[in-house]
Image (spheres, grey):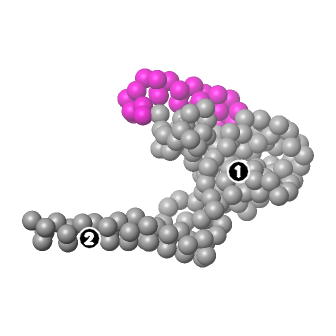
């Protein structure tokens, strides 16, 4: 029995050290060495102070800011409570919320179809990105609130649109946090 038990215990300890300690430490070290910004959480700093992350959306509610997707994570973009709403496509509560949000947004920009990502949550509830169409949809509201020319805002959205990876993978996106920081650089904040 000890002839079988000893090798099993030695392998258990060996693989625990290799896969539970050495491998994670090596990957973390390589990540910090070659991708320090990403390994550190892709933090956004302003005047030496951390104000957010490129990877987690923030709640911008003032009319002079671009708004992200609705969030089902806790009290809105709560990184400690990341999750979707778990409401299925036939849920009356979900359909009522989406219809209400679409009705509100259509008043903001009549005669323009409401982009679906402005009324639906992401799976994590923390999505920092919207489609270029969702950003362009919001331009009339922001132009009015900030007193900026719509053409200037359109150029800002285009400058912050991230294309598909290698021109093939995914969809073009706009990071709302970065876009709003650039917007603040254009004019004084209104929130």
Q: Is residue 158 magenta?
A: no
Magenta segment: 86-111
Residue located 57% across and 48% down the image = 127
Residue located 53% across and 26% down the image = 97
Instruction: Identify the secondary structure beneath mark 1.
Output: strand
Residue located 66% across and 66% down the image = 37
Image mark for residue 89: none
Tell me where residue 164 appears, x and y as whole percent: 55, 65
Tell me where residue 12 appears, x and y as whole percent: 28, 66
Location of mark 1 (residue)? 52
Work out whether 153 lies above or below 68: below
Residue 22, quarter of the rendered image: bottom left
Residue located 40% across and 26% down the image = 91
1 or 2: tag closer to the N-terminus: 2
Residue 144, quarter of the rendered image: top right
Quarter the C terminus occupies: top right
Q: Nearer the viewer, residue 163 or 111?
A: 163
Left or right side of 65 for 21: left
Left or right side of 163 for 94: left
Location of mark 2 (residue)? 11
Left or right side of 186 for 65: left
């Amino acid at each position: 029995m000890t002839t079988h038990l000893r090798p099993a215990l030695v392998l258990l300890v060996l693989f625990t050290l290799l896969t539970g300690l050495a491998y994670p430490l090596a990957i973390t070290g390589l990540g910090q060495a070659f991708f320090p910004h990403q390994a550190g959480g892709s933090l956004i700093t302003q005047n030496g102070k951390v104000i957010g992350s490129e990877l987690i959306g923030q709640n911008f509610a003032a009319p002079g800011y671009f708004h992200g997707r609705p969030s089902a994570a806790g009290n809105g973009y709560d990184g400690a409570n990341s999750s979707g709403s778990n409401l299925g496509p036939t849920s009356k509560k979900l359909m009522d919320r989406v219809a209400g949000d679409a009705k509100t947004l259509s008043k903001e920009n009549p005669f323009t179809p409401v982009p679906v990502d402005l009324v639906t949550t992401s799976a994590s509830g923390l999505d920092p990105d919207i489609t270029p169409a969702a950003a362009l949809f919001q331009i009339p509201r922001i132009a009015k609130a900030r007193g900026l020319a719509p053409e200037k805002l359109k150029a800002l959205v285009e400058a912050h649109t991230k294309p598909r990876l290698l021109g093939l993978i995914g969809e073009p996106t706009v990071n709302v946090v970065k876009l709003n920081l650039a917007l603040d650089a254009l004019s004084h904040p209104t929130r």
